[in-house]
Image (cartoon, grey):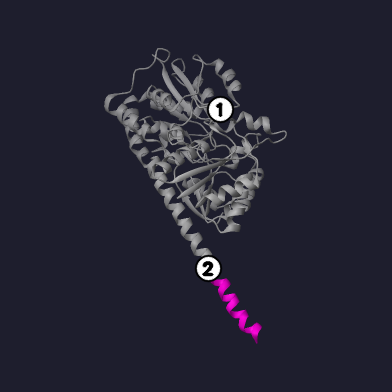
Amino acid sequence: MKILFVIDSFYTTNNGTSISAQRYAGELRKRGHEVRVLCWDTPSDQGTKDQEPSTKENNLTDGDFTTEKFRIPVFQPLCDKHDFSFAYNDKEIVHEACDWADIVHIFVPFGIGIEAVNYCNEKGKPVTAAFHVQPENMTSSVNMGKVEWFNELFYKTFRQEVYNRVRHVHVPSKFMGDMIAERGYTAKIHAISNGIQSEFLEAGKEFIDHGRPAKSAELEGKIVITMVGRLSGEKRQDVLINAVPYSKYADKIQLVFAGKGPKYDEYVALGEKLPNKPMFLYLSKEELIHHLGMTDLYVHASDMESEAISCIEAFATGLVPVIANSEVSATPQFALDGRSLFTPGNPKDLARAIDYWLDHPNERKYIGELYYQSAKRYTLENSVTQFEEMLQEEIEDCAKEQEKKNEKTVAHHSIRLPLFMW
Protein backbone atom coordinates (compact mmCIF):
# COMPACT_ATOMS: atom_id res chain seq x y z
CA MET A 1 0.00 0.00 0.00
CA LYS A 2 0.96 3.64 -0.49
CA ILE A 3 0.16 5.07 2.94
CA LEU A 4 0.13 8.76 3.82
CA PHE A 5 0.55 9.77 7.47
CA VAL A 6 -0.89 13.21 8.21
CA ILE A 7 0.54 14.70 11.40
CA ASP A 8 1.52 18.29 12.18
CA SER A 9 4.89 17.51 13.79
CA PHE A 10 6.39 14.14 12.89
CA TYR A 11 10.06 14.29 13.85
CA THR A 12 9.89 15.50 17.46
CA THR A 13 11.15 13.04 20.10
CA ASN A 14 9.25 14.53 23.05
CA ASN A 15 5.73 13.72 21.91
CA GLY A 16 4.18 10.28 22.28
CA THR A 17 1.97 10.57 19.20
CA SER A 18 4.88 11.56 16.97
CA ILE A 19 7.08 8.76 18.32
CA SER A 20 4.29 6.27 17.72
CA ALA A 21 3.90 7.56 14.15
CA GLN A 22 7.65 7.15 13.58
CA ARG A 23 7.62 3.59 14.85
CA TYR A 24 4.53 2.59 12.87
CA ALA A 25 6.00 4.10 9.70
CA GLY A 26 9.26 2.23 10.21
CA GLU A 27 7.54 -1.11 10.78
CA LEU A 28 5.21 -0.64 7.82
CA ARG A 29 8.13 0.08 5.52
CA LYS A 30 9.86 -3.07 6.71
CA ARG A 31 6.78 -4.93 5.51
CA GLY A 32 7.05 -3.49 2.02
CA HIS A 33 4.58 -0.62 2.22
CA GLU A 34 5.49 2.81 0.90
CA VAL A 35 4.96 5.39 3.65
CA ARG A 36 5.15 9.14 3.21
CA VAL A 37 4.45 11.86 5.74
CA LEU A 38 2.58 15.15 5.48
CA CYS A 39 3.91 17.45 8.21
CA TRP A 40 5.72 20.76 8.72
CA ASP A 41 9.04 19.55 10.14
CA THR A 42 12.11 17.62 9.03
CA PRO A 43 14.79 15.83 11.09
CA SER A 44 16.97 18.94 10.86
CA ASP A 45 14.24 20.98 12.58
CA GLN A 46 14.27 18.68 15.60
CA GLY A 47 17.88 17.55 15.69
CA THR A 48 18.93 13.93 15.18
CA LYS A 49 20.78 13.01 18.39
CA ASP A 50 17.86 11.20 20.00
CA GLN A 51 15.94 10.37 16.86
CA GLU A 52 14.14 7.06 16.78
CA PRO A 53 16.33 4.42 15.10
CA SER A 54 13.35 3.37 12.98
CA THR A 55 13.26 6.85 11.47
CA LYS A 56 16.89 6.85 10.41
CA GLU A 57 17.07 3.21 9.35
CA ASN A 58 13.99 3.45 7.12
CA ASN A 59 14.93 6.77 5.52
CA LEU A 60 11.52 8.29 6.14
CA THR A 61 12.57 11.69 4.82
CA ASP A 62 12.27 10.39 1.26
CA GLY A 63 9.12 11.78 -0.31
CA ASP A 64 7.77 13.75 2.65
CA PHE A 65 5.18 16.41 1.85
CA THR A 66 5.99 19.46 3.96
CA THR A 67 4.08 22.67 4.62
CA GLU A 68 5.20 25.75 6.50
CA LYS A 69 5.10 25.92 10.29
CA PHE A 70 1.99 27.72 11.54
CA ARG A 71 2.62 30.01 14.48
CA ILE A 72 -0.44 30.74 16.64
CA PRO A 73 -0.62 34.29 17.98
CA VAL A 74 -0.51 34.49 21.81
CA PHE A 75 -0.40 30.70 22.30
CA GLN A 76 2.78 29.92 20.34
CA PRO A 77 5.09 30.23 23.40
CA LEU A 78 2.94 27.60 25.14
CA CYS A 79 3.19 25.31 22.10
CA ASP A 80 6.96 25.79 22.07
CA LYS A 81 7.19 24.75 25.72
CA HIS A 82 5.45 21.50 24.82
CA ASP A 83 7.66 20.94 21.74
CA PHE A 84 4.65 20.98 19.43
CA SER A 85 3.80 23.22 16.50
CA PHE A 86 0.97 23.16 14.00
CA ALA A 87 1.43 22.77 10.26
CA TYR A 88 0.13 25.50 7.98
CA ASN A 89 -2.89 24.25 6.06
CA ASP A 90 -1.60 24.59 2.51
CA LYS A 91 -4.47 23.01 0.59
CA GLU A 92 -2.44 22.52 -2.59
CA ILE A 93 0.19 20.45 -0.75
CA VAL A 94 -2.45 18.54 1.24
CA HIS A 95 -4.31 17.63 -1.94
CA GLU A 96 -1.10 16.61 -3.72
CA ALA A 97 -0.16 14.35 -0.82
CA CYS A 98 -3.60 12.72 -0.67
CA ASP A 99 -3.62 12.16 -4.45
CA TRP A 100 -0.35 10.21 -4.11
CA ALA A 101 -1.69 7.76 -1.53
CA ASP A 102 -3.79 4.61 -1.70
CA ILE A 103 -4.99 5.43 1.81
CA VAL A 104 -4.61 8.40 4.14
CA HIS A 105 -4.28 8.14 7.93
CA ILE A 106 -4.87 11.21 10.12
CA PHE A 107 -3.01 11.30 13.46
CA VAL A 108 -4.27 14.57 14.93
CA PRO A 109 -7.52 16.49 14.27
CA PHE A 110 -6.09 19.88 13.35
CA GLY A 111 -5.79 21.99 10.17
CA ILE A 112 -4.05 19.67 7.70
CA GLY A 113 -5.88 16.66 9.13
CA ILE A 114 -9.28 18.30 8.69
CA GLU A 115 -8.42 19.36 5.14
CA ALA A 116 -7.21 15.84 4.31
CA VAL A 117 -10.52 14.37 5.50
CA ASN A 118 -12.47 16.94 3.46
CA TYR A 119 -10.51 16.18 0.32
CA CYS A 120 -10.57 12.39 0.70
CA ASN A 121 -14.33 12.39 1.23
CA GLU A 122 -14.80 14.63 -1.80
CA LYS A 123 -12.65 12.36 -3.98
CA GLY A 124 -13.85 9.04 -2.58
CA LYS A 125 -10.38 8.22 -1.26
CA PRO A 126 -9.91 5.76 1.66
CA VAL A 127 -9.16 7.65 4.88
CA THR A 128 -8.85 6.66 8.54
CA ALA A 129 -8.07 8.63 11.68
CA ALA A 130 -6.45 8.06 15.07
CA PHE A 131 -7.66 9.48 18.37
CA HIS A 132 -4.39 10.22 20.16
CA VAL A 133 -5.05 13.77 21.36
CA GLN A 134 -7.01 13.54 24.60
CA PRO A 135 -8.66 16.96 25.13
CA GLU A 136 -7.84 16.84 28.83
CA ASN A 137 -4.15 16.82 27.99
CA MET A 138 -4.59 19.98 25.93
CA THR A 139 -6.76 21.85 28.41
CA SER A 140 -4.42 21.00 31.28
CA SER A 141 -1.84 23.22 29.61
CA VAL A 142 -4.03 26.22 30.48
CA ASN A 143 -5.04 24.85 33.90
CA MET A 144 -8.52 23.82 32.72
CA GLY A 145 -7.96 20.06 32.50
CA LYS A 146 -10.81 19.30 34.90
CA VAL A 147 -13.30 21.83 33.51
CA GLU A 148 -15.83 19.46 31.96
CA TRP A 149 -17.62 21.86 29.61
CA PHE A 150 -14.31 23.06 28.17
CA ASN A 151 -13.14 19.50 27.49
CA GLU A 152 -16.50 18.60 25.96
CA LEU A 153 -16.17 21.50 23.54
CA PHE A 154 -13.02 19.89 22.12
CA TYR A 155 -14.58 16.42 22.01
CA LYS A 156 -17.51 17.85 20.05
CA THR A 157 -15.32 19.82 17.63
CA PHE A 158 -13.05 16.84 16.97
CA ARG A 159 -16.10 14.62 16.40
CA GLN A 160 -17.73 16.99 13.91
CA GLU A 161 -14.60 17.95 11.98
CA VAL A 162 -12.87 14.57 11.70
CA TYR A 163 -13.98 11.46 13.53
CA ASN A 164 -17.61 11.19 12.44
CA ARG A 165 -16.50 11.80 8.87
CA VAL A 166 -14.38 8.65 8.62
CA ARG A 167 -15.43 4.99 8.84
CA HIS A 168 -12.58 3.70 11.01
CA VAL A 169 -10.85 5.22 14.04
CA HIS A 170 -7.74 3.88 15.76
CA VAL A 171 -7.57 4.39 19.53
CA PRO A 172 -4.58 3.22 21.60
CA SER A 173 -6.74 1.65 24.33
CA LYS A 174 -10.23 0.29 24.97
CA PHE A 175 -10.57 3.01 27.59
CA MET A 176 -10.25 5.72 24.94
CA GLY A 177 -12.61 3.84 22.63
CA ASP A 178 -15.27 3.78 25.34
CA MET A 179 -14.67 7.47 26.11
CA ILE A 180 -15.37 8.61 22.56
CA ALA A 181 -18.20 6.13 21.93
CA GLU A 182 -20.02 7.60 24.93
CA ARG A 183 -19.69 11.02 23.29
CA GLY A 184 -21.44 10.07 20.06
CA TYR A 185 -18.47 9.04 17.90
CA THR A 186 -20.02 6.72 15.33
CA ALA A 187 -17.05 5.30 13.36
CA LYS A 188 -15.91 1.73 13.90
CA ILE A 189 -13.38 1.86 16.74
CA HIS A 190 -10.18 -0.20 16.61
CA ALA A 191 -8.44 -0.43 20.00
CA ILE A 192 -4.82 -1.05 19.04
CA SER A 193 -1.88 -0.39 21.36
CA ASN A 194 0.78 1.98 20.08
CA GLY A 195 3.11 -0.93 20.75
CA ILE A 196 6.53 -1.31 22.35
CA GLN A 197 9.73 -2.13 20.54
CA SER A 198 11.24 -5.59 20.98
CA GLU A 199 14.37 -4.21 22.67
CA PHE A 200 12.46 -3.58 25.91
CA LEU A 201 11.22 -7.18 26.10
CA GLU A 202 14.64 -8.50 25.17
CA ALA A 203 16.13 -6.48 28.01
CA GLY A 204 13.44 -7.76 30.36
CA LYS A 205 14.29 -11.37 29.55
CA GLU A 206 17.98 -10.64 30.09
CA PHE A 207 17.31 -9.00 33.47
CA ILE A 208 15.07 -11.86 34.61
CA ASP A 209 17.43 -14.61 33.46
CA HIS A 210 20.72 -13.06 34.52
CA GLY A 211 19.87 -10.33 37.01
CA ARG A 212 19.62 -6.58 36.68
CA PRO A 213 22.82 -4.63 35.92
CA ALA A 214 24.85 -3.05 38.71
CA LYS A 215 23.92 0.52 39.50
CA SER A 216 26.15 3.36 38.40
CA ALA A 217 28.31 5.15 40.95
CA GLU A 218 25.81 7.98 41.41
CA LEU A 219 22.95 5.53 42.02
CA GLU A 220 24.81 2.93 44.08
CA GLY A 221 23.27 2.39 47.51
CA LYS A 222 20.08 4.25 46.58
CA ILE A 223 16.55 3.12 45.89
CA VAL A 224 15.89 4.26 42.34
CA ILE A 225 12.32 5.21 41.43
CA THR A 226 11.82 6.27 37.83
CA MET A 227 9.03 8.02 35.97
CA VAL A 228 9.13 8.59 32.21
CA GLY A 229 7.14 11.32 30.51
CA ARG A 230 6.89 14.94 29.48
CA LEU A 231 7.32 17.36 32.37
CA SER A 232 3.85 18.88 32.20
CA GLY A 233 1.02 19.49 34.63
CA GLU A 234 -1.21 16.54 33.77
CA LYS A 235 1.66 14.05 34.14
CA ARG A 236 1.80 14.93 37.85
CA GLN A 237 5.49 14.42 38.58
CA ASP A 238 4.81 16.74 41.51
CA VAL A 239 2.78 13.99 43.23
CA LEU A 240 5.80 11.67 43.18
CA ILE A 241 8.13 14.38 44.49
CA ASN A 242 5.69 15.17 47.29
CA ALA A 243 5.27 11.47 48.14
CA VAL A 244 8.91 10.88 49.05
CA PRO A 245 8.84 12.62 52.48
CA TYR A 246 5.96 10.32 53.52
CA SER A 247 7.96 7.18 52.75
CA LYS A 248 9.94 5.33 55.41
CA TYR A 249 12.67 5.07 52.75
CA ALA A 250 12.84 8.81 52.05
CA ASP A 251 16.56 9.08 52.89
CA LYS A 252 17.44 6.38 50.34
CA ILE A 253 15.05 7.19 47.49
CA GLN A 254 16.53 8.69 44.35
CA LEU A 255 13.89 9.96 41.92
CA VAL A 256 14.74 9.97 38.22
CA PHE A 257 12.51 11.76 35.73
CA ALA A 258 13.15 10.91 32.08
CA GLY A 259 11.71 13.63 29.87
CA LYS A 260 11.59 17.36 29.38
CA GLY A 261 8.85 19.97 29.34
CA PRO A 262 7.46 23.25 30.64
CA LYS A 263 7.40 22.21 34.32
CA TYR A 264 11.14 21.56 34.52
CA ASP A 265 12.07 24.62 36.60
CA GLU A 266 9.11 24.15 38.93
CA TYR A 267 9.92 20.49 39.56
CA VAL A 268 13.62 21.19 40.13
CA ALA A 269 12.64 23.75 42.80
CA LEU A 270 10.09 21.36 44.35
CA GLY A 271 12.70 18.62 44.56
CA GLU A 272 15.13 20.76 46.55
CA LYS A 273 13.43 19.67 49.78
CA LEU A 274 14.27 15.98 49.27
CA PRO A 275 17.29 14.27 50.86
CA ASN A 276 18.39 13.22 47.36
CA LYS A 277 17.54 15.84 44.76
CA PRO A 278 15.67 14.39 41.75
CA MET A 279 17.62 13.72 38.57
CA PHE A 280 16.16 14.99 35.30
CA LEU A 281 17.42 13.13 32.24
CA TYR A 282 16.62 13.06 28.54
CA LEU A 283 17.59 9.61 27.31
CA SER A 284 17.90 7.76 24.02
CA LYS A 285 16.17 4.41 23.80
CA GLU A 286 19.35 2.50 24.61
CA GLU A 287 20.13 4.79 27.56
CA LEU A 288 16.57 4.45 28.85
CA ILE A 289 16.69 0.65 28.75
CA HIS A 290 20.00 0.67 30.63
CA HIS A 291 18.57 3.04 33.21
CA LEU A 292 15.42 0.96 33.68
CA GLY A 293 17.73 -1.95 34.43
CA MET A 294 19.11 0.02 37.40
CA THR A 295 15.62 1.05 38.59
CA ASP A 296 13.93 -0.53 41.60
CA LEU A 297 10.36 0.68 41.09
CA TYR A 298 8.50 2.50 38.32
CA VAL A 299 5.82 5.12 39.07
CA HIS A 300 3.28 6.57 36.63
CA ALA A 301 1.47 9.40 38.41
CA SER A 302 -0.30 10.94 35.41
CA ASP A 303 -3.92 12.05 35.79
CA MET A 304 -4.67 11.75 32.06
CA GLU A 305 -3.39 9.21 29.54
CA SER A 306 -4.71 7.62 26.37
CA GLU A 307 -2.35 4.67 26.93
CA ALA A 308 1.10 5.56 28.42
CA ILE A 309 3.47 3.52 26.28
CA SER A 310 6.34 4.50 28.61
CA CYS A 311 4.68 2.54 31.41
CA ILE A 312 4.48 -0.59 29.23
CA GLU A 313 8.13 -0.17 28.26
CA ALA A 314 9.05 -0.02 31.95
CA PHE A 315 7.21 -3.16 33.05
CA ALA A 316 8.41 -4.95 29.90
CA THR A 317 11.84 -4.82 31.55
CA GLY A 318 10.46 -6.62 34.63
CA LEU A 319 9.70 -3.59 36.79
CA VAL A 320 6.59 -3.39 38.95
CA PRO A 321 4.63 -0.20 38.13
CA VAL A 322 2.73 1.94 40.62
CA ILE A 323 -0.03 3.73 38.71
CA ALA A 324 -2.45 6.57 39.48
CA ASN A 325 -5.93 5.04 39.43
CA SER A 326 -7.44 7.96 37.51
CA GLU A 327 -10.86 7.82 35.88
CA VAL A 328 -9.58 9.74 32.85
CA SER A 329 -6.50 7.61 32.26
CA ALA A 330 -6.09 4.32 30.39
CA THR A 331 -2.96 3.35 32.32
CA PRO A 332 -4.73 1.62 35.27
CA GLN A 333 -5.69 -1.15 32.81
CA PHE A 334 -2.12 -2.43 33.07
CA ALA A 335 -2.24 -3.05 36.84
CA LEU A 336 -2.31 -6.77 37.60
CA ASP A 337 -3.88 -6.07 40.99
CA GLY A 338 -4.71 -3.24 43.38
CA ARG A 339 -1.23 -3.17 44.90
CA SER A 340 -0.03 -1.36 41.78
CA LEU A 341 -2.62 1.40 42.10
CA PHE A 342 -2.85 4.54 44.21
CA THR A 343 -5.34 7.37 44.59
CA PRO A 344 -4.56 9.97 41.90
CA GLY A 345 -3.09 13.22 43.15
CA ASN A 346 -2.54 11.78 46.64
CA PRO A 347 1.14 11.77 47.73
CA LYS A 348 0.43 9.90 50.99
CA ASP A 349 -1.32 7.05 49.19
CA LEU A 350 1.47 6.88 46.64
CA ALA A 351 4.01 6.64 49.49
CA ARG A 352 1.95 3.79 50.95
CA ALA A 353 2.11 1.86 47.65
CA ILE A 354 5.82 2.56 47.25
CA ASP A 355 6.59 1.35 50.78
CA TYR A 356 4.60 -1.84 50.26
CA TRP A 357 6.70 -2.89 47.28
CA LEU A 358 9.96 -1.80 48.89
CA ASP A 359 9.05 -3.78 52.01
CA HIS A 360 8.57 -6.95 49.91
CA PRO A 361 11.55 -7.29 47.51
CA ASN A 362 11.03 -10.99 46.79
CA GLU A 363 7.39 -10.48 45.98
CA ARG A 364 8.33 -7.47 43.85
CA LYS A 365 10.75 -9.62 41.85
CA TYR A 366 8.12 -12.34 41.29
CA ILE A 367 5.36 -9.90 40.30
CA GLY A 368 7.83 -8.07 38.04
CA GLU A 369 8.21 -11.28 36.05
CA LEU A 370 4.42 -11.46 35.66
CA TYR A 371 4.41 -7.88 34.38
CA TYR A 372 7.12 -8.82 31.87
CA GLN A 373 4.90 -11.63 30.59
CA SER A 374 1.89 -9.30 30.33
CA ALA A 375 3.91 -6.83 28.24
CA LYS A 376 4.25 -9.38 25.44
CA ARG A 377 0.68 -8.52 24.38
CA TYR A 378 1.74 -5.02 23.42
CA THR A 379 4.49 -5.58 20.86
CA LEU A 380 4.86 -3.14 17.98
CA GLU A 381 4.72 -6.02 15.51
CA ASN A 382 1.31 -7.17 16.77
CA SER A 383 -0.01 -3.62 16.79
CA VAL A 384 1.07 -2.88 13.22
CA THR A 385 -0.51 -6.13 12.00
CA GLN A 386 -3.84 -4.98 13.46
CA PHE A 387 -3.28 -1.52 11.99
CA GLU A 388 -2.70 -3.04 8.52
CA GLU A 389 -5.98 -4.95 8.87
CA MET A 390 -7.80 -1.72 9.71
CA LEU A 391 -6.37 0.03 6.65
CA GLN A 392 -7.32 -2.87 4.38
CA GLU A 393 -10.84 -2.89 5.82
CA GLU A 394 -11.19 0.82 5.04
CA ILE A 395 -9.97 0.33 1.46
CA GLU A 396 -12.59 -2.40 0.96
CA ASP A 397 -15.34 -0.37 2.63
CA CYS A 398 -14.50 2.67 0.54
CA ALA A 399 -14.65 0.61 -2.65
CA LYS A 400 -18.08 -0.75 -1.66
CA GLU A 401 -19.32 2.75 -0.92
CA GLN A 402 -18.15 4.01 -4.30
CA GLU A 403 -19.78 1.04 -6.00
CA LYS A 404 -23.09 1.84 -4.30
CA LYS A 405 -22.86 5.45 -5.43
CA ASN A 406 -22.18 4.35 -9.01
CA GLU A 407 -25.16 1.98 -8.93
CA LYS A 408 -27.42 4.77 -7.68
CA THR A 409 -26.19 7.05 -10.44
CA VAL A 410 -26.90 4.42 -13.10
CA ALA A 411 -30.35 3.70 -11.62
CA HIS A 412 -31.16 7.41 -11.50
CA HIS A 413 -30.36 7.89 -15.16
CA SER A 414 -32.13 4.69 -16.25
CA ILE A 415 -35.35 5.97 -14.69
CA ARG A 416 -35.15 9.52 -15.98
CA LEU A 417 -34.31 8.68 -19.59
CA PRO A 418 -37.65 7.01 -20.57
CA LEU A 419 -39.62 9.74 -18.79
CA PHE A 420 -37.71 12.41 -20.65
CA MET A 421 -38.21 10.68 -23.99
CA TRP A 422 -41.91 10.19 -23.27
Q: Position of residue 52 (x, y in %)?
A: 46, 31
Q: Secondary structure at mark 1?
A: loop
User: Which one is in front in this view, the residue at disc 1 or the one at disc 2?
Assistant: 2
> Quick one: quadrant of the C terminus?
bottom right
Left or right for 391, reference 304: left
Compared to residue 32, the image places residue 82 above or below, namely: above
* Nearer to the camera, 169 or 6: 6
Tell me the amino acid under the disc marked 1.
Leu
| Mark 2, residue position | 404
Give the residues drawn in magenta, as a range: 403-422
Residue 412 on the magenta segment: yes
Q: Position of residue 373 (x, y in %)?
A: 33, 37
Q: Secondary structure at mark 2?
A: helix
Left or right for 223, reference 64: left
- Which of marks 2 and 1 precedes in the sequence? 1
Tell me the amino acid under the disc marked 2.
Lys
Quarter of the image for residue 356 reads top left
Q: Position of residue 171 (x, y in %)?
A: 50, 47
Residue 107 on the magenta segment: no
| Mark 1, residue position | 231
* Nearer to the camera, 370 or 203: 203
Looking at the image, which residue sits at the far right? Answer: 73
Q: Residues within 10 Å of mark 2 (few under 14, many from 20)?
A: few
Residue 378 in sight here: no
* Nearer to the camera, 10 or 296: 10
Quarter of the image for residue 44 reads top right
Looking at the image, which residue sits at the far bottom? Answer: 422
Residue under the image location 61 percent in, 45 percent down:
93
